[in-house]
Image: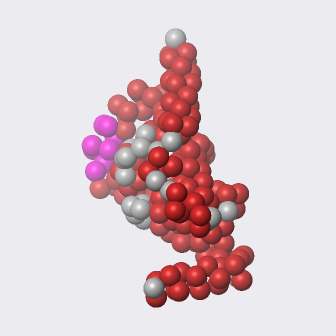
Amino acid sequence: MNYLFFFNNFINWIEINYLLSLFLFFTFILFYSIFSLPGLIIFFVFSGYVFGIFFSYLICIISFSLGSLCFFIISKYILSKLFKKYYAKYTNKVNKFINNSTLEYLIIFRLIPGTPLIVQNIILSLLDISSFRFILSTSIGATPFILFSILIGNKLNNIDSLKNFNSKDIFTIDLLIVLFVIIFFITIRIIYKKK
């Protein structure tokens, strides 16, 4: 019962200090992404619950992309210094393979669920890609999952929906169709570019 009281007070504080809450949440997600910690989806759902869809999406996608970029730059520097010989060897092999369709491969890589963020960012740091391509691919590739998490949080905001909420609300066919369509068109683009 004390948890519910604390949660309600916390939500009231956020409503009273909305702009400060947005800034603090942005900073929190930024640093959480810099360290590539697991469990970001929980905070995305929370943001949908508290801030609504529009502001949540903007805050989450920008802070997530910038935080991942910081991790990418730092890990690229560390890996290239510590494992100079292996880094150059594997980077050249991977870059030759994805040379013509780098952006498309990066977007598909971000769309694949289940891979921990830290693993994704370390693998991407092996590639010879610009910061702009990294930010663009991260923003596009992470959008379906971030938006989906925010929508769940926004749906939970209505107390009546908590009573009727089940796992079918999380794993909808719409999400799978959208992911399949995005991956399909990106794959077609990659095949077309290789010809």
Between 63 and 100, the one nearer to me in the picture: 63
**Furthest-top residue in this view:** 195
**Where residue 133 appears, x then y in whole percent?**
57, 42
Q: Looking at the image, which residue is at 38% across and 33% down?
A: 94
Residue 88 part of the magenta segment: yes
Q: Looking at the image, which residue is at 51% across and 49% down?
A: 169
Task: Give the total of numbered labels.
Answer: 0
Between 193 and 11, the one nearer to me in the picture: 11
Q: How is the image coloured?
A: secondary structure
**Where residue 137 appears, x then y in whole percent?**
56, 42
Quadrant of the drawing holding the N terminus: bottom left
Q: Quadrant of residue 10?
A: bottom right
**Where residue 42 appears, x then y in whole percent?**
47, 63
Q: Which residues are magenta?
A: 83-90
Q: Is residue 46 visible?
A: yes
Q: Is residue 90 above or below residue 63?
A: above
Q: Looking at the image, which residue is at 37% across and 46% down?
A: 114
Q: Is residue 179 visible?
A: no
Q: Is residue 19 above or below residue 101?
A: below
Residue 114 part of the magenta segment: no
Q: Looking at the image, which residue is at 55% across and 15% down?
A: 192
Q: Quadrant of residue 61?
A: bottom right
Between 130 and 159, the one nearer to me in the picture: 159
Give the prevailing secondary structure in the magenta stretch. Answer: helix
Between 62 and 163, the one nearer to me in the picture: 163
